[in-house]
C-alpha cells in the first residue's frame, strides 16, 4: 500500500485478485515461448532491438 496511497485496501485487493495468479508468478514453458514469439516478431518488424531469447529466463 506504500505505492498505492490513493487506493483503498479493498480496491488494491481487487486488483491483486484480478492480476496476480499462478501464471503471473511462473510463466512456465508456454509463457516463455509466447513472450519469445512476441519479441521475435517485434524484432523482425523493427519495433524492438534484437534480443537473445536466453535472456528471458
Image: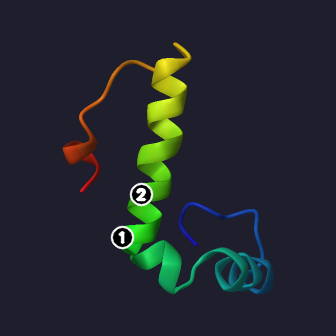
- In the depicted view, which residue is nearer to us: 21 or 9? 21
- The answer to which image quadrant residue 16 occupies is bottom right
Q: Residue at x 56, y 17 (%)?
A: 45
Single out the residue that lies furthest toward the left: 54
- Name which residue lies at 51% across and 78% down: 23
Coloring applied to the structure: rainbow
Compare residues 14 and 21 and report the one nearer the observer: 21
Residue 41 x, y percent position in the rendering: 52, 31
Q: On screen, 57 above or below 24? A: above
Mark 2 sits on what residue?
A: 33
Given the current orientation, which residue lies at the most extreme top position? 46
Question: In the rendered view of the protein, which quadrant contains the N terminus?
Answer: bottom right
Regarding mark 1 in the picture, which secondary structure is present there?
helix
Up-down relation of residue 14 to residue 38 (above or below)? below
The residue positioned 50% from the left and 55% from the top of the image is 34
Query: Crowding near pointer 2: few (<14 within 10 Å), some, many (20+)?
Result: some
Q: Secondary structure at mark 2?
A: helix
> Residue 47 has which mark?
none
| 11 shown above or below 6 | below
Cα–Cα gap, marks 2 and 1: 6 Å
Q: Are marks 2 and 1 in contact (CB under 8 Å)?
A: yes
Residue 22 location (% of width, % of height): 49, 86
Q: How many marks?
A: 2
Give the vertical position of 49 relative to 13 (above or below): above
Q: Indicate left or right for 52 with 43 as reference.
A: left
How crowded is the residue under tag 1: few (<14 C-alpha within 10 Å), some, or many (20+)? few
The residue at which mark 1 appears reads as 29
Residue 49 rendering spot, x and y as whole percentages: 39, 18
Q: Please state the horizontal and vertical placement of residue 47, each as a whole percent of the image.
A: 55, 18
Displayed quadrant of residue 17 = bottom right
- Quarter holding the C terminus is bottom left
Amino acid at each position: 500500500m506504500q505505492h498505492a496511497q490513493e487506493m483503498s485496501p479493498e480496491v488494491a485487493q481487487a486488483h491483486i485478485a484480478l492480476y496476480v495468479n499462478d501464471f503471473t508468478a511462473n510463466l512456465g514453458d508456454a509463457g516463455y515461448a509466447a513472450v519469445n514469439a512476441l519479441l521475435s516478431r517485434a524484432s523482425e518488424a523493427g519495433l524492438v532491438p534484437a534480443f537473445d531469447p536466453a535472456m528471458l529466463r
